[in-house]
Image (cartoon, rainbow, N blue to C red):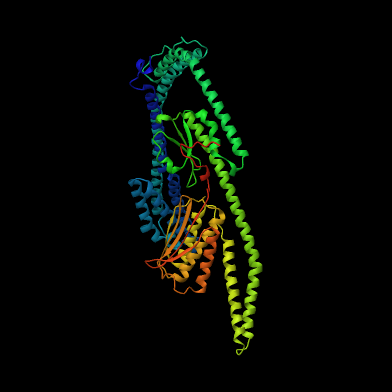
Amino acid sequence: MGVGRRFVPSHYTLSLTLGLILAGVSLLALSGMVASGWLAETARHDAQVINQAGSLRMQTWRLKAQAPTADTQQWQALLNAMDHTWQQLDEAVALEYNARVARQLTALHLEWVSALRPDMRTPEQAANVNAARITAHVNGLDALTGNLQNLAEARIARLRALQGILLLLTLPLIGWGAYQLHFHVRRPLRRLLSVIEALRAGELQARTGYWRNDEIGLLAATIDDMAGQLDVFCRHLNDQVEERGHRLQQSHLALSLLYDNARYLATTPPEAINLQQALSPFEALMAPAELALISPDTALDDPPHTHLFPLLEETEDPLMLMARLPGGAPLPDWKCRICETLADQLGAALALRAQGRQKRRLALMDERAVIARELHDSLAQSLSYLNIQAMRLTRALPKEVDSTASVILGELRDGIDHAYRQLRELLVTFRLRLTEDGIKAAVNATVAEFTERGHLEIDTHLTIADNRLSPDQELHLVQILREALANVVQHAAAQRVSISLLEHDGHITLAVEDDGVGLPEQVNRSHHYGTIIMAERARSLGTTLELTRRETGGTRVALEFTVEGAGHDAVRAGPGHSDRG
């Protein structure tokens, strides 16, 4: 019989009772603290005010006593001290005392300001003041001091009375709470603990025998029902042990396969890893589920209940491990966990492969930087020297010199300029560094640079994956793009440029179109050099450069070349893939 059918308390009276007791004690304590704090705050200036009132009495008698002997400077200091004390007393009483005390203080202060002080401006005048007036004023101050003292004592009495009332209210609540804890918590819990110890010792017939409409009663009923159900659990224990043993065998086999797969991936060079071969040992364990490596585009067409596990989540063109049961049945959780671990292993292998490529990319960049420095330090300086010498020779030749020598000298300078331009282009190529983010990041960086340099509006359309090209191919493409944009900035007078870098079935297409003046009828030498550089780089990619005039105006620079299986396309497979070699 379930707990809900045996005992359902309508109200949790124990927690409510204890909560009310705790809330009451807390409320009384908080009220006492707030009231005490308020009374203490109102009485914080009592001592100061009483002291200042007494000080006024003393200062009044001092004025009368020192009048015969004080000089003018001393007398003025005494009067200023008296005025300062009156000001402090006025401020304190106005803030925290009742109207009666305030009126009494105001009358005394008015008497001092309007009657006594004008007659005591100098020591000579003060000596002539009647002692009875001084005595009457001091008596008024005595009465004020007495009233202030009475107010302070009254506040203390109110605080004492309030604390006594709160204490009288708190004690019954504490007693009631102690009673509830002893009879309705402590004793029932001791009984419940004794039954629990008996159940742990194997005495399944032990019962609490406690019935009450509260939380402890619900707990006792639950323990009694639990004891009755232990027999049922024991009868099913053998079946559970057998089932768990079968699961342990499956887990052992899965761990063994995962270990062998991890060892294969760790000991095989990254470029030689066959992902389909790594999947083959898991076919028997995952049967009747089908395992395959597919692309995200293929995954979009998969039916429901197809489980997909990405191998490389951070790449834009990842592989995915597909697991699917016949008939679209859901995959068991333990098989899902195996697939997740297997996908992580294969993903780590692909990550190592990508890391190796990146290391080779960085090594290539460093090598190019070294070559660029060496060229700059040697050949660039030599060409600069030859150019300077040619200029000196031109100036040194007389104007009536043979025209043939002038032509030869001009051709020499043109050759030096052409060689220097090619050297600069070579240095730019060697110094060009591609980030680890891939070809898209390099193209976007180039677009940002020329947008700022030429004030152009550049549109980009990039569908190529970052891992499709080798470092050399990426460098050639970026340099062709840079040279094309440089020609647009220098010669085209264009406002808008469109760049597309597309991939389709292993074909890479780069096109740069502008809305400028188009190709001139006679291509000047500087523009011709840029075209030669782009054509040479296109040949390095195994293709030719297309330089055409657009019908709508402007120029189109395009090239297309084919790449072999890059990235991880070589191991891409669909659901029907049967190659396990």
Q: Name the side, left or right, on which 379 lies relative to 156.
A: right
Question: Would you identify the image quadrant in which residue 415 lies?
Answer: bottom right
Q: Residue at x 65, y 64 (%)?
A: 374
Residue 325 in the image: above or below residue 505? above
- Quadrant (top left, top right, bottom left, bottom right) of the C terminus: top right
Residue 332 in the image: above or below residue 74? above
Q: How many numbered discs sit on the rendered protein?
A: 0
Of residues 31 and 542, the one nearer the viewer is 542
Expressed as whole percent of the image width and height from the top left, the position of residue 400 reads 60, 90
Of residues 113 and 65, the one nearer the viewer is 113
Residue 346 in the image: above or below residue 77? above
Of residues 571 and 366, the one nearer the viewer is 571
Of residues 50 and 361, the one nearer the viewer is 361
Residue 98 in the image: above or below residue 326? below
Expressed as whole percent of the image width and height from the top left, the position of residue 41 reads 42, 43
Residue occupying the far bottom of the picture: 400
Question: Would you identify the image quadrant in which residue 371 lies?
Answer: bottom right
Q: Is residue 406 visible?
A: yes
Expressed as whole percent of the image width and height from the top left, the position of residue 518 reads 42, 69
Expressed as whole percent of the image width and height from the top left, the position of residue 544 reads 50, 61
- Quadrant (top left, top right, bottom left, bottom right) of the N terminus: top left
Q: Is residue 164 visible?
A: no
Q: Residue at x 37, y 58 (%)?
A: 113
